[in-house]
Amino acid sequence: MDSLIIQGGSCLKGTIKISGAKNSALPIMAASLLSEEPISLGNLPHLADITMMNQLLMNMGARVEFADDHRRLQLHTAEVYNEGIMLAPLAHTMRASFLVLGPLLARFGYARLPLPGGCAIGQRPVDMHLRALSALGVSFELGDAEVVGRVDDSLRGAQVSFEEPTVGGTENILMAAVLAYGETCIDNAAREPEVVDLAQCLQAMGARIEGAGTSTITVEGVERLGACDYDLMPDRIETGTYLVAAATTGGSVRLENARADTIQVVMRHLEQAGAELSTGEGWVALDMGGRTPRAVDIETAPYPGFPTDMQAQFTAMNAIADGSSRIVERVFENRFIHTKDLCRMGADITVSGNEARLRGGATLRGATVEANDLRASASLVIAGLVAEGETTIEHIYHIDRGYEWIEEKLRRLGAEIKRCPNQSQG
Ligand code: EPZ
């Protein structure tokens, strides 16, 4: 596995372009299974997870064509056959593969998938997905490692209510409901912008959806969906990550192809930290003016609350910021993985259950650390940028899952960073 080597001490300055959203691309690629006509996606990011989803769809017989230097992807699923077990080798390594469940049930009335395991940040069960789909007329058989779903006679619209908002659960039920008979009402739906992006793409394919982005989504099923040409939204977590990296290093950056409306809470926390933010049509800028940020308290929540995917990045900033802070993680049960390595680098963090307390003002020292979760890795990159000396981040596969060309983008902002292919790779 490759490593990243960072010489700390750079103050990030300059302009970079934000890539398309990973967490929009994955459900929308799964949605290609809902139509026998091709869908064409623009603003596609080059990420390991996208490659994995492409491979998974091709394993089922889909045709995948790239254009515009891999920025545009055309997916043809007319010849897809439903051998769900084909997913096994890949599905265990990428949870998002479970997002083909709803589309396969809607298209074929049958799906057989490996159950996605837990991961570093938590157990990540799928019980809410299965209960919601059962309400539409699906019977499930659960094995130790796989689930088989069968539509009893036909998918019928229903009233579905989630005990708590689930992004993937909302997306799976949405993708089944668009081809069900009658109306489906989803209550306590996830409101994330990526759910809205999926809904807009489904509407472009001919689906009838109201209320995406609110807690109540209504779907009127249709006979079939057609082709569409759709551009993915910019990645709001990548946007937030570079803003926090700039604030942590006292820098000043401008992010093109960004959408400020999807990161309002993140921007408010950065203003509390002392950053000056400005926005325009398709761009967001942050200026820290060389100052050290003030520590800010964080409590994660489903959208439009503070995004759990930004918690680790702010933890790194708080480690060096002025003042103490309290971070409460309310979405996942084990999302303080990054604190161990941050403490090895000199941070003063005490974790108790779902709460971390930080004493700021630390001087971080470079170290050799390991990436084992996407956002925890981003946190370690930010720490390396501001640490004294050299930081080596090993096993950066996780970073490549969610951050397109991270070393090029950071180098363009003045960071001293390079990628080292692991010589031992066979
Ligand atoms: C999506 O995961 C994102 N992934 C995650 O981003 C993100 O952290 C998460 O939403 C929350 O915003 C993608 O979109 C591909 P959930 P998802 O279902 O859908 C519990 C990243 O770094 N739950 O909203 O899996 C669950 O355990 C990734 O890009 C159940 O209990 O998240 C969690 O505690 C990490 N039963 C909470 O709900 C279920 O059936 C929210 O999970 C489903 C979820």
Image (cartoon, rainbow, N blue to C red):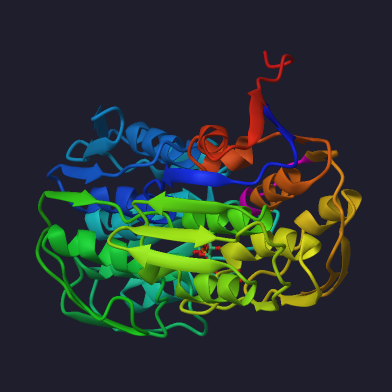
Between 151 and 15, the one lying in front of the other is: 15
**Relative depth, front residue between 14 and 182:** 14
Horizontal placement of 343 versus 55: left or right? Answer: right
Q: In the rendering, at what x and y percent does residue 336 appear?
A: 76, 62
Quarter of the figure that contains the N terminus: top right
Residue 173 at x, y percent in the picture:
35, 69
At 73% across and 58% down in the image, what residue appears? 316
Q: Is residue 310 above or below residue 11?
A: below
Query: Is 90 in front, or is 42?
Result: 42
Q: Residue at x 16, y 72 (%)?
A: 221
**Ligand 1 sits in which quadrant?**
bottom right
Q: Residue at x 44, y 45 (%)?
A: 15
Most extreme residue toward the front is 289
Residue 6 placed where, x, y %? 72, 34
Q: Which residues are magenta?
A: 370-375
Decide whether residue 350 is among the magenta residues. no
Q: Is residue 186 visible?
A: no
| Residue 141: percent from left, percent from top | 49, 62
Corner quadrant of residue 397: top right
Is residue 181 depicted above or below 248 in this figure?
Answer: below
